[in-house]
Amino acid sequence: MKWKQLEHKGPYFAPLYEPLPDEVHFYYDGKAMKLSLATEEIATFYGKMLDHEYTTKEVFQNNFFNDWRKEMTVEEKKIIKHLDKCDFTEIHKYFVNKNEARKALPKEEKQKLKEEAERLQEEFGYCILDGHREKIGNFKTEPPGLFRGRGDHPKMGMLKKRIMPEDVIINCSKDSKIPEPPPGHKWKEVRFDNTVTWLASWTENIQNSIKYIMLNPSSKLKGEKDWQKYEVARRLKGVVDKIRFQYPGNEKEEGETADTVGCCSLRVEHIQLYHELDGQEHVVEFDFLGKDSIRYYNKVPVEKPVKLVRLLELRRKSLYVLLHPQTYSSYSFLRSLLLLSGFLFFTVFWLSYMCLHLLAEDNIAAKILSYNRANRAVAILCNHQRATPKTFEKSMQNLQTKINAKKEQLAMAKQELKRAKADAKVKKDVKSESNVDKKKKLLAKLEEQLMRLHTQATDKEENKQVALGTSKLNYLDPRISVAWCKKFGVPVEKIYNKTQREKFAWAIDMADEEFEF
DNA sequence: TTATAAACTTAGTACTGCACCC
DNA sequence: GGGTGCAGTACTAAGTTTATAA
């Protein structure tokens, strides 16, 4: 049982399609063509994305065109036969302008929009769960559009259909005020299932999977689950030395998703063995696409020569592991390990443990820097990558300019100090002595500032392609961070922003400086 | 016991809005 | 007061785990 009482307003539906003004045209084969409403709407999905890389990909184009044609009227279908004869540029321009116009709106208008959004959040964004008002994570249905699968996704560009109340299942408690569907509509179903945590759900048409409306991470329900997770990890720490392997993951349907792999769906082609590489002996090279089609590349030297061994029938799935020759026959050993959730063990435990050590080892002076370093080490270990920010080069240059300016200042300050010293030597009076002091202080200040800028630059460079958020939010036991803050007198606000503090309220409440993972 | 569906967590990217600068 | 850079937030895809059906 996940709750006793659950009351909410149901999802907020994406706004209906607004037809294009008459002066915005779609052209086929050079001729303006008025499209039916449904066809036009889908055309705008493509038009909006015209400057996106997606629209240059063949798979995207084909999927889009196929799905688009399915929604066309018979007449439209007769005419529109090739995507390359479609001209969406006016549509594209229209939306670019619209966007700019919105940005340029006067203050009062923007304020009005903001208030409207807040009103929506108030009305639909909260529910009552067991007497507490809790924030909902996603209270809006996903708007229609073109599917943006990541990596080499075979379904990219397919039409993601509009969700109607008739698609939505509502979950709430029987005796609560049951949400009203929008006027003229009804829900697909209303159910009263307190063994699950979701408030509403619908089936999306791309992968045929279910989407849910669920609570915000700040809620008690999610917080307790999170806590539980770390407690499991914590209990596993005593057996760390005995465990070395992941258990088999899930299989993926070929052609339905991008070809990505994990620890156990890894194929022979992803591993290269070298007797010697870059001056090191016995090197194993990994190269594959993981979750979100993020590339994992690593070269790992091992103590002894290894062989690729196929482990038969481990939960009926082939699993390739690297084993030292002595351990070829130890299937039963492996099997016993597979009872554990390898995921929990591997990630949460190991990362929390690692973070703890890194945090404890560093000196107090560079407290926050040290925290961020530990965070980064974990993120790198997990291969949490991000695209280099678009403004990276520029902001790096800006920083370099600042550094150069500071260097000049520093050089000048050195000169001045020299002069002041010479001056004091001649005059030997109080005034010139204090001048020397002043110049010394200035120099010290500038040196410190320069150092800070250098650190900043290093930090930035090292963070270029590293996404810190995921490990911070999902893998590092927040109680470790909280305890660390308390121990070293760092305000929690320095490491967790408002949202993060809300999510980790349980940990902030629970952990004192004595907490040990 | 195993296949499949449902439920729930983790993940990167796009957008938003605010602090800061000139 | 207008632009800009970036932290924070919204969004939703892509995983893993759990429940259920066969």
Image: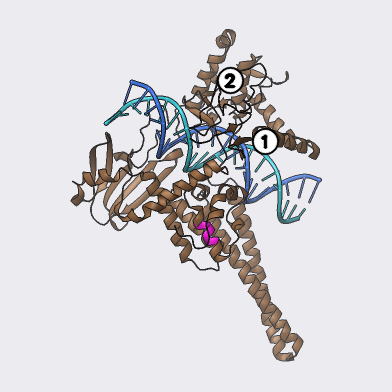
Chain colours: A brown, B cyan, C blue
Residue depicted at 74% across the width and 86% down the height? A432
Say what secondary structure mark 2 lies in.
loop
**Percent position of residue A166, x then y:** 57, 19
Closest to the observer, B21 or A250: A250
Q: Is residue A484 magenta?
A: yes
Tell me whether the residue at label 1 lies in contact with that at label 2, contact meaning CB atoms closer than 8 angstroms. Answer: no
Residue at (58% x, 49% y) in the render: A500
Magenta stretch, main secondary structure, is: helix
Q: Position of residue C17 (x, y in %)?
A: 40, 39
Left or right of residue A288: residue A209? right
Q: Amino acid at mark 2?
A: Trp
Residue A259, x across and y down, in percent: 39, 34
Question: In this image, A308 relative to C15: left or right?
Answer: left
| Bounds of the magenta segment | A480-485
Give the chain letter at badge 1.
A
Q: CA distance from mark 1 to mark 2?
A: 21 Å
Residue position marked by numbered label 1 in the rendering: A121
Q: Name the amino acid, label 1.
A: Gln
Disc number lying in front (1 or 2): 2
Count residues near mark 1 (Cα–Cα under 10 Å), then give few for <14, some for 14-19, many for 20+: some
Residue ID for mark 2: A187
Residues beneath discs 1 and 2 located on the same chain: yes
Q: Is residue A370 left or right of residue A337?
A: right
Q: Nearer the viewer, residue A49 or A14?
A: A14
- Dot 2 crowding, Cα within 10 Å, few <14, some 14–19, many 20+: some
Badge 1 or badge 2: first in the primary sequence: 1
Q: Is A142 rendered above or below residue A463? A: above
As rendered, which of A482 and A205 lies closer to the eye? A482
Asked if one can make out residue A386 in the rendered structure from this viewpoint, the answer is no
Location of the C terminus of chain A by quadrant is: bottom left
Q: Mark 2 — on which chain does it sit?
A: A
Instruction: Say what secondary structure mark 1 lies in.
Output: helix
